[in-house]
Amino acid sequence: MKRQILIVTALFFLSLVVPEGVFADAEGDLFSAAVEEIFDTYSSTNMKKDVEGWIALWDEEGIKMVPDLPSIYGRSAIGEFKHKKSQTPDEMEMSIKVEDAQIAGDFGFAHGTYFVSVTPKGRGAVKSKEGKFLTIFKKQADGSWKIYRDSVSPNPAPK
């Protein structure tokens, strides 16, 4: 746990002190493209309730952090959590906007915003929420990127 906190803290401070443009190279461009593709798949698999496709985006040692629940450790436990959440007949629309993606060696991170709209099947009103996220990615042995840590935070409901 201390290691994960150290990694997140180091990446955060690195993003503050490294001059803009240092990561604007081919590897950074490839990482940014990979992040966009991962989040496109993240959204589409969520909307289709494709748990297998969604969990394939995760590193074996991934940690999912959602509001009002303890952290979920490991791809297997994250998959079980997602499977339970996908058992509803409700329809979901989801969009993710990446605001920034940075790379630092075998780790990278992205933050941005999301929008989710859930339409209950045959009952109730549409529920929508917006929020922000911070996701850390880990480079895999084959050169691909997987979600290593994912934290989401919904914005307060409009008053």
Image (spheres, rainbow, N blue to C red):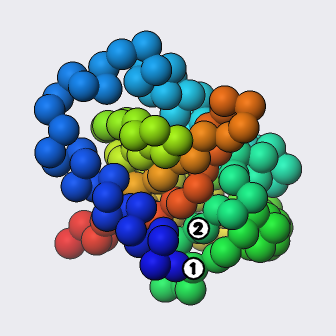
* Disc 2 and disc 1 in contact, CB within 8 angstroms: yes
Q: Which mark is residue 64?
A: 2
Q: Secondary structure at mark 1?
A: loop
* Spatial separation of the CA atoms under disc 2 and disc 1: 6 Å
Residue named by callout 1: 71
Question: Considering depth in this image, is 49 or 105 the residue closer to the camera?
Answer: 105
Q: Quadrant of the C terminus?
A: bottom left
User: Quick one: label 2 or label 1, which is nearer the N terminus?
Assistant: 2
Residue 96 image position (x, y, % from top left)? 46, 41
- The answer to whether any part of residue 68 appears in the image is yes
Question: Considering depth in this image, is 7 or 131 the residue closer to the camera?
Answer: 7
Q: Is residue 49 above or below residue 90?
A: above
Q: Residues within 10 Å of mark 2 (few under 14, many from 20)?
A: many
Q: Which residue is painted at 38% across and 68% down in the image?
A: 6
Q: Is residue 47 above or below residue 27?
A: below
Residue 94 image position (x, y, % from top left)? 55, 45
User: Is 16 positioned to the left or the right of 42 in the image?
Assistant: left
Q: Is residue 141 above or below residue 86?
A: above
Q: Mark 1: which amino acid?
A: Ser
Residue 146 image position (x, y, % from top left)? 64, 44
Q: Mark 2: which amino acid?
A: Lys
Name which quarter of the figure residue 83 lies in. Answer: bottom right
Q: Which residue is painted at 46% across and 38% down in the image?
A: 105
